[in-house]
Image (spheres, helix red, strand yellow):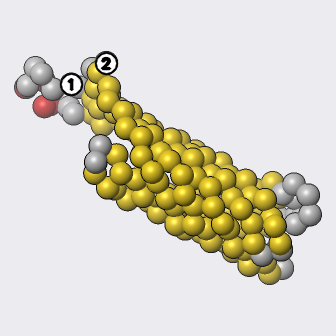
Amino acid sequence: MSGWLGSATLNLTRNFGVEGDLNGEYGSNNLGAASLILPTVPSSINSRMHSFNVGPNGIYRRDKYDAFGHLLFGFSHTNINASGVGQGSTSFSWVLGGGADYNFSPKWAARFQLDLLRTHFFSLAANHARVGLGVVYHIGAH
């Protein structure tokens, strides 16, 4: 699955903040020849997942680099559909991870992030790895 990730951190001190994280992931699997051989098998299965999590964020700042770690809690929702028939599930979720920023200027940075998102959809626990590359814009003092 691939998608997007947006987050915002309210820095309470220079090295500690509260973070909110919102993401969406989307995927499709083509079942190929199976759908041609078996008439009841759909040609593809589509899925999407959205998550919202909030929690503490620790930040280590040094010159042009910032490293951060977070433990976030919230909820996730998924929907899986095939041939116009869908099934959804909502569950408690948590995120453990972190990353690093390279600060190009006081306002702009490049980010690498690696997280583990844990969900429990359809009564089944699952781990989802999230790898993110992106741009950071700092509002206020950094």
Image position of 83 with respect to 87: above or below: above
For the residues bearing labels 2 and 1, Cβ distance under 8 angstroms? no
| Residue lying at 21% horizontally and 33% vertically, measured from the top left | 31
Which residue is denoted by mark 2 in the rendering?
A: 84
Left or right of 109 in this view: 124: left
| Residue lying at 75% horizontally and 66% vertically, measured from the top left | 17
Whole-number angstrom distance, CA of label 2 to CA of label 1: 10 Å
| Residue type at tag 2 | Gly
Secondary structure type for disc 2: loop
Q: Residues within 10 Å of mark 2 (few under 14, many from 20)?
A: few
Q: What x and y, as percent, mark residue 55?
A: 63, 61
Q: What x and y, as percent, mark residue 123?
A: 28, 48
Quarter of the image where one finds residue 61: bottom right
| Residue type at tag 1 | Pro
Q: Residues within 10 Å of mark 1 (few under 14, many from 20)?
A: some
Q: Nearer the viewer, mark 2 or mark 1?
A: 2
Q: Is residue 2 visible?
A: no
| Residue lying at 14% horizontally and 31% vertically, measured from the top left | 33
Left or right of 16 in this view: 91: left
Quadrant for the N terminus in the image: top left
Q: Is residue 84 visible?
A: yes
Using the image as rendered, state which of residue 43 and residue 120 is in the foreground. Answer: 120
Q: What x and y, as percent, mark residue 100?
A: 67, 70
Quarter of the image where one finds residue 30: top left
Residue situated furthest bottom in the rendering: 62
Query: Which of the labelled discs sits on residue 42, or is there none?
Result: 1
